[in-house]
Image (cartoon, rainbow, N blue to C red):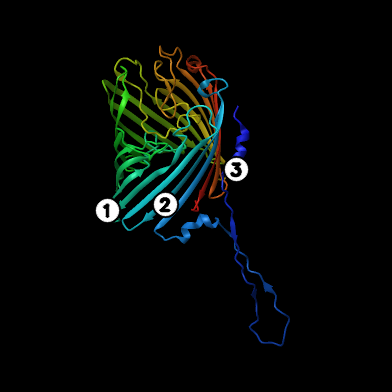
Amino acid sequence: MFRLDYARRVSSSLATAVAVVAWCAVPFAQQASTDAPPPALPQPTTVAPQPTPRKEPPFPNRANEVMPSWLRVRGEFRERVEGYDNAGFVEGADDAFFLSRVRLTATATGKHVAATVQVHDARVADKSIGPTAAPFKAPFDLRQAFVDIRNARTPLTARVGRQELAFGDQRLIGPGNWTNAGRTFDGARVTFQSKVGQVDLFAASLVRILDDEFDKSGNGNGLVGAYLSSPRVVPRGTVEPYVFWRRDVNQRAETGVFGALHQVTTGARLVGRMPARFDYSIEIDLQRGSLGPDSVRAWAGHWQLRESLPLAGTPHVIGEYNYASGDADPSDGIRGTFDQLYATGHDKYGLADQVGRRNIHDVRAGVDVTPIKATPITVNYHMYWLADARDALYAASGAAVARVISGASDRRVGQELDVQIAHPLTEQLSLAAGYAHLFAGPFLKQATPGASYSGPFVMVTYVFLAEK
């Protein structure tokens, strides 16, 4: 069982904000007569209304107010207690652990150049099942270090150095900040902006998190891409076509030999509004290339429709379908499993993160409502089944979770129910909590012991050295 008594330790790991209230003293105004008659009774005095006191963060969170205008700093501390019942769908494989993370960021800005440096340290405690290395742990190291070069007279900007990459809905490329370590790249990015839209060109290499040495990129992996965004093509909508080329080495082909991956992902994302308070989101991806002697033939799609209801709490009702191809024959020399690249996979296909964008059908129905100001509550229901019976079920990380080598007799993975809530306690301190339960279906009962999986979490985030 998830050990709820661990949650008491969260409070001892945080530095909570202390509000300082500044009162403005308003003097009494005395009414005087303009005439000069004989001495009269004193005139009554009136009290001016006091303004509402302005609450300010404690001084350490206003450090930027006393620093030079060209220098800005920000700190963030995050503590999450997380756990699960029946890891790997095995009855009794329960765990609960703590994830702590500190990030410090400094930015110096000049006329045409700005430099940003970010260091971080991420730790895991009391985790007894499964790995404890990255992405759970990332010992103190340089996370970002980049230079922005820009000129107000030109629409071009350039960013060079260690940086996050995020595009669109991050279903292919994102920093993955839910994980304790997160993800960064070493590379360069050029952005061109105009009234018609924006174009981003980049070339980068994934940074590997290492325990006892400086985190490094390279090692044979590379990512090159172009991402366009234009609000002028479709009325009340934005079109985002893109192309990504990925290279990696020491990848296993279907024959068992290791080779280099050369893969092109072309796709487009379309988001916008329709009549009757409807929003839509569509994203289609096609992959072609080679892995050693194998060819790559894969595709994926995302379709979402959301309606805003004219009711108290601003509720939204969401319907969604996701598909990612699998490999129908693991020995035919054709790799059909979709590659989700460097996605931010958390909660895209379920809060439990046991399902990723590979070899999957996912139908989602959800609702979010804000009954209290700035306190959204989200409830989602997912239904899963495999795209191909001979391929695996993959987690949000892209790793295989379960497989029936000869082919599953039933492709139904199961159903999941998720609940989340978030609330800002102050401008610096925020609280979030959630619970996911995946009901194991016929496939999981054939490929694993078949116990249903549960995963709760409670997370507190505290921003310091800055107001927000």
Q: Seen in the image, is 328 located left or right of residue 99?
A: left
Total numbered circles: 3
Q: Is residue 434 visible?
A: no
Q: Secondary structure at mark 2?
A: strand
Amino acid at dot 3: Ser
Of discs 1 and 3, which sits in the foreground?
3
Image-quadrant location for residue 422: top right
In the rendered image, residue 287, in percent from the top left (x then y), is placed at 30, 27
Q: Secondary structure at mark 3?
A: helix
Image-quadrant location for residue 82: top right
Contact between marks 1 and 2 (CB within 8 A): the answer is no
Can you identify the residue that label 1 sits on? 154
Front-most of 316 and 72?
Answer: 72
Cα–Cα span, label 1 and label 3: 49 Å
Front-most of 184 and 446?
Answer: 184
Amino acid at dot 1: Thr
Can you identify the residue that label 2 sits on? 106
Q: Secondary structure at mark 1?
A: loop
Mark seen at residue 11 = 3
Q: Is residue 458 above or below residue 447?
A: below
